[in-house]
Image (cartoon, grey):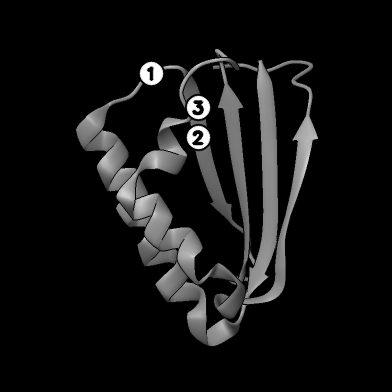
Amino acid sequence: MTTTIVQYRTKPERAEENQQLINAVFGELELRQPDGFTYKVFRLQDDVSFIHVMIEHDPGGPDLVQDLSTFKAFVANIVDRCESPPVETKALVVGGYR
């Protein structure tokens, strides 16, 4: 199991746009219903910080999220939307519930 965490801070005037792009990704995921991973995105209380958590249950499998057209649109201009650029960190799941 592989876990990737990406954290960044958007420009205040671009936070809603970022949220809409994320919603589009989840809309496409809902339609396609791919298996093999868990994907969660959190918008923090400051309203401009986002954390994406991807847990791949089968690390050798296809990378379905990055192949989505909505995800490609999301990452296309992310640096322009951000005050602090995305930082990716690998993590190890040590416990969880549901």
Give the residue pinned by disc 2.
Answer: 39
The residue depicted at 33 percent of the width and 24 percent of the height is 34
Instruction: Examine the rendered structure and indicate whether residue 81 appears above or below residue 13.
Output: above
Residue at 61% over, 73% down = 79
Q: Disc 3 designates what residue?
A: 38
Comparing 77 with 41, the one in front is: 77
Type of amino acid under label 3: Thr
Q: Is residue 97 left or right of residue 66?
A: right
Amino acid marked by disc 2: Tyr
Looking at the rendered structure, the kind of residue marked 1 is Asp
**How far apart are labels 1 and 3 at the CA level?**
8 Å
Residue 84 appears at what percent x and percent y?
73, 72
Callout 1–callout 3 Cβ contact below 8 Å: no
Mark yes or no: residue 46 visible: yes
Res 68 quadrant in image:
top left
Q: Is residue 38 above or below residue 43?
A: above
Which secondary structure, mark 2? strand
Q: Is residue 59 above or below residue 11?
A: above
Density class for disc 3 (Cα within 10 Å; few <14, some 14-19, many ≥20) is few
Looking at the image, the residue that sits furthest to the bottom is 13
Q: Which mark is residue 35?
A: 1
